Amino acid sequence: MNMPVHFDRVQVLSLDMPFILGKAPPYVSASLDVEADVAPVAGFIADTNTVVLVGHGVTSLGRTLSEAYHRLNAFVSEVRRNILAEQLAALKGTRPAYRSDEEIEAMHRFADAIIYPTRAEQVMHPDDA
């Protein structure tokens, strides 16, 4: 009997999500009613641009509406990749090869320079320029 897979966060397969989001999305418990009291959000909202409201939905922020929409689409696309990768891996009896936390942190550090470069040369290796 196949048991459903439980996800507690979206893993990263692609280069897209870390570079486009630039920061890891926090996951807000379903027990927290942010519509009734937004005070608990104040502690982390400045440090992110995409928030996952478990059991409810996703909220993305940006400097423009276009940027927020781009981030939301990047997150949703990564969710789709996770689902497909888990399904295909289950068929093969393997596990998906998700990116490491170190890789993701490096991508977050250079996200702005890659997504919105003033000059796209040597972005991941600024000391080599």
Image: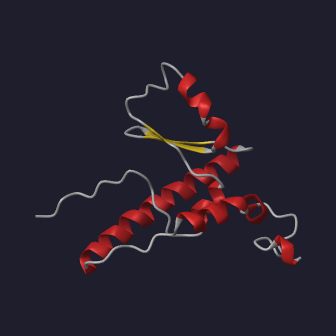
Q: Residue furthest left?
A: 1
| Nearer to the camera, 5 or 73 | 5
Residue plotted at (82% across, 75% down): 122
Residue 39, image quadrant: top right
Residue 64, image quadrant: top right
35 up-or-down from 109: above or below = above
User: Is residue 59 shown left or right of residue 33?
Assistant: right
User: Is residue 57 shown left or right of residue 94?
Assistant: right
| Nearer to the camera, 76 or 11 | 11
Quadrant occupied by the C terminus:
bottom right
Q: Residue furthest top?
A: 36
Q: How many marks?
A: 0
Whether residue 46 appears in this view of the structure is yes
How is this picture coloured? secondary structure
Residue 110 position, x and y percent, is 73, 63
Residue plotted at (74% across, 44% down): 63
| Nearer to the camera, 83 or 40 | 40
User: Is residue 118 shown left or right of residue 59?
Assistant: right
Residue plotted at (35% across, 54% down): 7
Residue 19 position, x and y percent, is 65, 62
Residue 33, image quadrant: top left
Residue plotted at (16% across, 64% down): 2
Whether residue 19 appears in this view of the structure is no
Residue 42 position, x and y percent, is 61, 28
Quadrant occupied by the N terminus:
bottom left
Q: Residue furthest bottom?
A: 92
Residue 115 position, x and y percent, is 73, 62
